[in-house]
Image (spheres, helix red, strand yellow):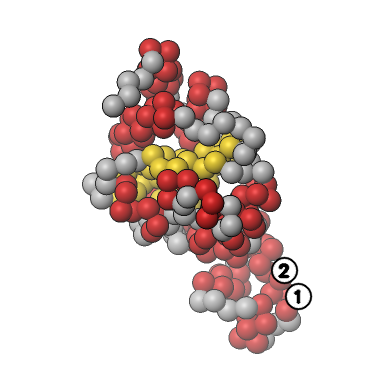
Amino acid sequence: MEFLPGNIYQKILTFMDEVTGTEPDFRKQVLLAFDRLFGFHQSNFWLSDENENFIDPVMLNIDKYVMDDYLENHYHFDVLIPQKMIHRIHKQRVISNLELFPPQGYEKSEFYNNFMKKYGFYYDVGLVLYNENKIIGLIDFVRSKKDHPFSSFELMSMEMISRFLTQKILQSPLRPYESAKNNINDRFQELTLKEREVLNLVQKGFTNVDLANELFISVNTVKKHLQSIYKKLDVSNRTSLCYKINTK
């Protein structure tokens, strides 16, 4: 068993002192602390809804269009989504993509070639926030292939911090999915009656043509309603809309 060097252990203690759990932008503060203390420059912090779908990501040094592309086209190919790593989470809260997928196979995978490689990502580690057999959040860290892999000391540090952050979230007035739920409920009230009709049919899998036929409006009008819904609910595509509305 490896022991953490004193300087890394001190970083963990500093992290715990600085991340109080009281900031309104708590998740962003967590990512910034990881960046400053450990050099984890690119990351995102997901909440988990009642069905353990990852929702409402907060990102650090990752562009929004990258996340939109991920949610729209690549989410289900990711080896670090809960359904694909649940068997490990009971004992291990920090999981590397290369633990689940050997490098030779990973580099041939659709997910790597169509998403990770496209945006310069290679190494990927998920830090799971987990309590009483339920995933309540995930922090995801990525690095390029030219960077060094995540070291065993870094993974051990994340493992210790994962339990600390889980307790911080559990001690907060609202659970993560409840916070997201309240947020989406407030925004939902801004939708017009017609927009709610469109949203209901989108959730049922209707295409734009199906929507136009069902509501007796043109496809262009459907698109205008969708753009208005996206703007009001702060999403940019159907996939992220459906993930977000699931918390309502």
In the rendered view, tell whether residue 113 sits above or below residue 127: below
Residue 49 appears in view: no
- Per the rendering, the mark at residue 220 is 1
Q: At 57% from the left edge and 31% from the top edge, which residue is drawn?
A: 148
Q: Residue furthest front?
A: 104
Question: Which amino acid type corresponds to the residue marked 2 in the rendered image?
Answer: Lys
Q: At 53% from the left edge and 34% from the top edge, which residue is drawn?
A: 149
Separation (CA) of disc 1 from disc 2: 6 Å
Residue 110 horizontal/vertical position (percent): 59, 60
What secondary structure is marked by label 2? Answer: helix
Q: Quadrant of the C terminus?
A: bottom left
- Per the rendering, the mark at residue 224 is 2
In the rendered view, tell whether residue 114 sits above or below residue 137: below
Mark 2: few/some/many CA within 10 Å (<14, 14-19, 20+): few
Q: At 42% from the left edge and 21% from the top edge, which residue is drawn?
A: 15
Residue 52 vs residue 123, the one in the foreground: 123
Residue 23 horizontal/vertical position (percent): 46, 29
Residue 191 vs residue 29, the one in the foreground: 29
Q: In the displayed structure, does residue 220 sit left or right of residue 117? A: right
Q: At 56% from the left edge and 73% from the top edge, which residue is drawn?
A: 202
Q: In the displayed structure, does residue 3 sit left or right of residue 28? A: left
Q: Residue furthest left?
A: 132
Where residue 158 sits, quadrant-wise, is top left
Q: Quadrant of the N terminus?
A: top left
